[in-house]
Image: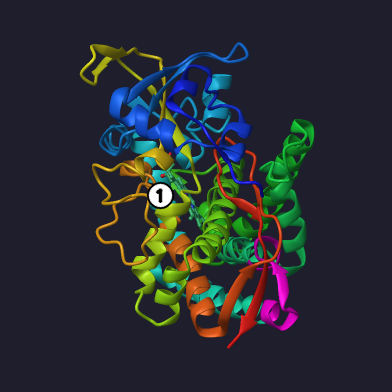
Amino acid sequence: MPSRIMLNPGDIATLDLTDPRTHAEYDLSEVWRHLRTTQPFHWHPSTGGAPGFWVVSRHADVSEIYRDNKRFTSEKGNVLTTLLMGGDSAAGMMAAVTDGPRHSDLRKILLKAFSPRALEGVVDNIRQSTRALVAEAIARGECDFAADVAADIPLTAICDLMGVPEADRAKVLELTATALGNDGAAQSPAAAWQARNDILAYFGTLAAERRANPGDDAISVLATGTLEGKPLTMDEIVVNCYSLIIGGDETSRMSMTGGVLALIEHPDQWQALKSGQADIATAVDEILRWTTPALHFGRTALEDIPVGTQGQVIKAGDIVTLWNDSANMDEDVFEAPERFRLDRTPNKHLSFGYGSHFCLGAYLGRAEIAAMLSALRDLVASVELRGDTRRNYSNLLSGVTSLPVTLRGE
Ligand code: HEM
């Protein structure tokens, strides 16, 4: 991967944060630093006929808006793509784009699937399969860490969580890759749309089976749950199943792969991991901060809100985007934020969001990264880059989609 080109504050006037290339090909750290200091609420002009939107870059403001679900809503979309299209077809049905009491009720149902008892087996399996994948990679000597190790772990965990039969897993993985557009810059929107519909139809079939014959997996929990005294509709069930995949697959993969790259680029931190000096739980959070797999989330303002010190007003109906990658590098919150330090504490990163929509899969995501770090520490003597890496093209999901490495065993 050629290193990303550093953009300067002078480039802000022409910056297009909606363009996937901006994030894949350019380093925005100087731009973010400048915005945090001089324009913490920056108005991004409209692009390609879509509306303009606010860009919020400081940790304090991003957290505040995440927490404020009275004056900001997720029901008109929570990511740039849907916000700019004017809404999300799953609004009011899928937890991430539902607010108010309905959202709390949906979260309560979903939380049953994330209970410690439900997750115990899933996490055990994550540990075992991660060790096995790393051991296989060592035996081969060379691998693409993204495709050969990280790709399988999150989706296997989500499939375990949902009780997806083994035989269907390869198909679910392929459809997910297409639906989320992580096949490179040339992803066709029609193929993505078709793949999304195919996944929804597949979950519909599973949900109908589980309604008749429930287990304790997430699909059964949704298929037997009630909202305002009524069973969830089939649409509500399938979009919430789908949300576990869109929420938990790519994000976790990006953090694991990005974590390995960060360790390669910071040999002192690799040593800290190997010597046992680095506490795994603390290291997991630094990897989450450093990689920030979800670049942004967004909201729509429900009323006029004065902001900042420059007399600006967010108007009712305005789109407001919250940039986690900037907030996680905010020097007001993180000491020497540009340093990757596995022993960083405190570490109030916003990689899982904040407030009422705080990531439901945070425990699972952390468990996956922890399993990877333990496997690397115990089984791998050295890891080296052996070719070009490739970055994801997206304005939402940031990270490395190909990481060719040589792994040597202990
Ligand atoms: C919500 C990030 C893993 C399921 C969120 C949000 C963020 C996030 C930032 C907040 C969205 C908002 O405020 O609009 C991440 C990252 C992960 C990860 C960085 C991995 C490193 C997972 C996993 C699952 C999951 C493993 C499930 C299997 C969800 C769900 C929501 C959510 C269902 C919506 C919660 C709600 O609206 O109440 N995630 N996530 N995530 N995440 Fe995650």
> Which residue is at 40% across, 14% downward?
317
Q: Magenta stretch containing residue 409, yes or no?
A: no
Residue 290 pos. (x, y %)? 43, 53
Q: Does residue 99 appear in this view?
A: no
- Magenta highlight range: 136-149
With respect to residue 120, does 62 lie above or below?
above
Residue 110 pos. (x, y %)? 45, 53
Q: Residue furthest left?
A: 309
* Residue that label 1 marks: 352
> Which residue is at 48% across, 25% downward?
76
Mark 1 and ligand 1: say if the CB distance to the nearest ligand atom is below 8 Å: yes
Residue 273 pos. (x, y %)? 43, 75
With respect to residue 247, does 117 lie above or below?
below
Q: Magenta stretch containing residue 142, yes or no?
A: yes
Residue 330 pos. (x, y %)? 31, 41
With respect to residue 272, does 112 lie above or below?
above
> Which residue is at 75% across, 37% downward?
187
Q: Neighbour class for label 1 at 10 Å: few (<14), some, many (≥20)?
A: many
On-image quarter of the C terminus: bottom right
With respect to residue 174, does 15 lie above or below?
above
Q: Does residue 195 appear in this view?
A: yes
Is the stretch drawn in magenta largely helix, strand or loop?
A: helix
Image check: 329 left or right of 346? right
Report the amino acid beneath label 1: Phe
Label 1's element? Answer: loop
Q: Residue furthest bottom?
A: 410
Image check: 180 left or right of 265? right
> Which residue is at 61% across, 40% downward?
24
> Which sits in the foreground, 37 or 198?
37
